[in-house]
Amino acid sequence: MPKKVRELEQALKKAGFVCTPGKGSHRKWKHDSGAYVLISGNAGDDAKPYQEKGVKIEIEKTQEKR
């Protein structure tokens, strides 16, 4: 069962990313290390597999730099 967009955003927030609004339902999550992820969709929507993968990769990158 796919995760919800809100779950991805919670994981990003927990990892230290900050949200900046974009156009429409798009949001750009930035980290102090320079990493960023674009998330589209409303909070209750199912996340796409590429979104889940992208969030996981960027969170791992920021943890490796610590």
Image: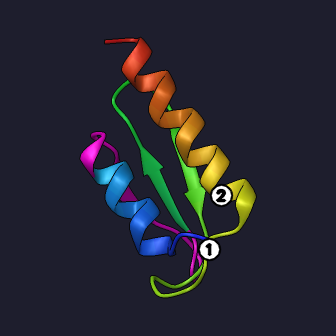
Q: Residues within 10 Å of mark 2 (few under 14, many from 20)?
A: some
Give, as a three-letter code, the residue at label 2: Gln
Q: Residue furthest front?
A: 1
Query: Residue shown at 70%/68% (left/top)?
Result: 48
Helix, strand or loop under label 2: helix
Q: Which residues are magenta?
A: 14-26
Nearer mark to the viewer, of 1 and 2: 1
In this rendering, position of residue 39 left or right of residue 59: right
Judging depth in this view, the residue of 35 and 61 nearest the camera is 61
Q: Where is residue 56 shown, x and y percent of the image?
A: 54, 41
Q: Quadrant of residue 26?
A: bottom right
Based on the displayed image, in which of its 4 quarters is residue 63 positioned?
top left
Horizontally, is 61 left or right of 18 in the view? right
Residue for point 50% across, 32% down: 35
Q: Which residue is mark 2?
A: 51
Vertical relation: 18 (above or below) 1: above
How crowded pointer 1 is (Cα within 10 Å; few <14, some 14-19, many 20+) is rated as few
Residue 1: numbered disc: 1
Q: Secondary structure at mark 1?
A: loop
Indicate the position of residue 59 as horizontal and vertical percent values.
Answer: 45, 35
Q: Nearer the viewer, residue 25 or 10?
A: 10
Asked whether 15 falls inside the magenta stretch, the response is: yes
Residue 57 picture location, percent across and down: 59, 34
Which amino acid, mark 1? Met
Q: Earlier in the sequence, mark 1 or mark 2?
A: 1
> Where does the N terminus fall, quadrant-wise?
bottom right
Asked whether 24 falls inside the magenta stretch, the response is: yes
- C-alpha separation, residue under disc 1 versus residue under disc 2: 14 Å
Q: Is residue 38 above or below residue 17?
A: below
Q: Kindly identify which numbered label has been placed on residue 46.
A: none
Q: Give the x, y percent position of residue 65.
A: 40, 12
Report how many numbered discs are placed on residues in the image.
Answer: 2
